[in-house]
Image: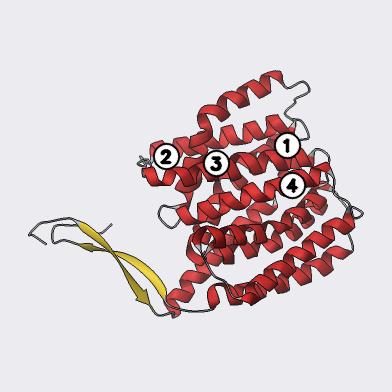
Amino acid sequence: MRHKDSATATISIAVPAGSGAETTARTGTVLAAAGVVAFSLTFPATAWALDGLSAWTATALRIGLAGVVAAVALLVLRVAPPARRHWGGLAVVAGGVVVGFPLLTALALETSSTAHAAVVVGLLPLTTAAYGAWRRGTRHPAAFWLAASGGAVLVAGFALWESGGGLSPADLLLFGALVVCAAGYGEGGRLAEEMPGWQVIGWALALCLPLSLPVAVLAMAVEPDGRLTARTVVGLAWLVLGSQCVGLMVWYRGMAVIGVGRASQLQLAQPLLTLLWAVLLLGERMSPLAPLTALGVLACIAVTQRTAGGGAGPTVVRVRRLGSGGQRS
């Protein structure tokens, strides 16, 4: 390399698993878990938003207002647009977690209880892990898949028991939400390895802004019985800031650190947390089966966390090799 040449080259170094790697893994787990807690409040917040708005209007406002927050942050911080190769993945994120999941679940919650929706969406960890494994060619040991499947069976059985053994139109909407959200989570986790997690969701929201903002304004104008009650405002505020912005930011960062499959299994606890919020915030009745389901799900989480990725191994760290005139990035 010539004198004062500031060109950089990316190299990969295998670092044996140790205290540094363990600390990084713990940080990623904490971030992903924080995202799960934020998401666990999404259904109760949606129910509050539906107190004064239709599902279509509530979703349009959620996407539009979150898009404004994201666009302002990107402009103020002067973030450069993503590379062209990232826009396909960002479109999947936008279609899955910005538009698809919020709309389908809001429509389902117009006729389904928060508790029932929570346990159906408990299948999300398995669909997310399956998408991530397919998309990236990741191989998990058999114990991982057995535990993940066991957790999914538990929450699915709980949902069927609660609904009397049948599937309603709301269930079909929720199953559709599972598919699009798994794709959005998987692509977002992959992108978060190359850009900050908040930029992943930020650009996905900004991508939807030219459509979401006019739709939000139109929806409010034609809403037949729309009213902004205190519960509606609080619910929307959480959906915009807690679920759509901060929650997804820490979630994607956590997935980038510990992997899509391992992070997704933390969501096995999400339906049980949502059940708790449904009781505390909405006054819904918790089934006696919920504590038993909680114990089984937590056991599955413990197994998947120990077996994801085949156990401890070397961590790959990417660093930049700098020329004499370069600066650290």
Q: Nearer the viewer, residue 222 or 175?
A: 175
| Mark carried by residue 49 | 1
Distance of label 3 from label 2 (alpha carbons):
16 Å
Tag 4 secondary structure: helix
| Residue 29 picture quarter | bottom right
Question: Could you say where residue 204 lies in the image, as x and y percent from the top left?
Answer: 50, 41
| Mark carried by residue 239 | none
Q: Which is more N-terminal, label 3 or label 4?
A: 3
Can you identify the residue that label 4 sits on?
A: 174
| Residue 317 picture quarter | bottom left
Q: Which is more N-terminal, label 4 or label 2?
A: 2
Tag 2 secondary structure: helix
Can you identify the residue that label 3 sits on?
A: 94
Q: Nearer the viewer, mark 2 or mark 4?
A: 4
The residue under label 2 is which amino acid type? Leu
Distance of label 4 from label 3 (alpha carbons):
18 Å
Q: Can see residue 175?
A: yes
Marks 3/2 in contact by CB < 8 Å: the verdict is no
Quadrant showing the C terminus = bottom left
Tag 1 secondary structure: helix
Can you identify the residue that label 2 sits on?
A: 74
Q: Nearer the viewer, mark 4 or mark 1?
A: 4
The residue under label 4 is which amino acid type? Leu
Question: Could you say where residue 300 lies in the image, as x and y percent from the top left?
Answer: 70, 72
Please say if 258 is above or below 163.
Answer: below
Distance of label 2 from label 1 (alpha carbons):
27 Å
Q: Residue at x 60, y 44 (%)?
A: 96
